[in-house]
Image (spheres, grey):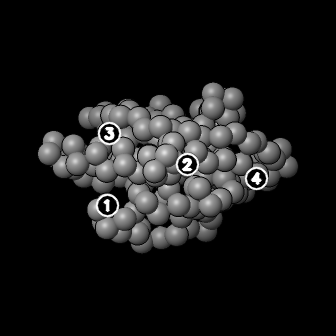
Amino acid sequence: MKYGVAAFPSKELQDLANSYRKRYDPHYELITPHITLKEPFEADGTEIKEVVEEMAKIAKRQKPFKLHATRVSSFSPVTNTLYFKVEPNEELLALHEDLHSDFFGGMPDYSFVPHITIAQKLSDSEHSDIFGQLKMAGIDHEETIDRIHLLYKLEDGSWTVYDTFRLTGAE
């Protein structure tokens, strides 16, 4: 089965992201607006129990982090994806690193760009037009994220929560 790790922002920020996603993101109905902390990975029933145990340890080690969405940005020219840029900070980067330890197979192939996707799979002209509009509208949103979620992919392609872990930084 396919799993992933994400953090969900507040309803306020989700509503704002969804106001764009319902028009510009074909994955709108598959997953709630989120920050991907660990890309999808495969695990069986035995492995996922170990993953849950490891994530519980990580949640005890890692502190809640500040989510500060500061602007609309794009992954163009690689993909025509638009997103709310989330400013990286010490806690968020430490959490990402912990989720990419040797236990989880090490660091990913590309650098971590914390973001919340608001549009994807756009044509070049759509991308240019929408990006210009959203850059002018801007965003400046801050909140604290105190939990992360282990998700799993259903047969219809949608994602749902398997388990939730509260970040305490108690260890």
For the N terminus, give its image quadrant.
top left
- Which numbered marker is on residue 71? 4
Residue occupying the point 60% across, 37% down: 9
User: Disc 1 designates what residue?
Assistant: 104
Residue 130 is left or right of residue 124, and the answer is right
> What's under tag 1, amino acid-wise?
Phe
Is disc 2 surrounded by few (<14), some (14 to 19) or many (20+) residues within 10 Å?
many
Measured as percent of width and height from the top left, residue 25 is found at: 55, 41
Is disc 4 surrounded by few (<14), some (14 to 19) or many (20+) residues within 10 Å?
some
Q: Is residue 90 visible?
A: yes
User: Disc 2 designates what residue?
Assistant: 63
Secondary element at image label 4: strand
Secondary element at image label 1: helix
Measured as percent of width and height from the top left, residue 163 is found at: 35, 34
> What's under tag 2, amino acid-wise?
Lys
> What's under tag 3, amino acid-wise?
Tyr
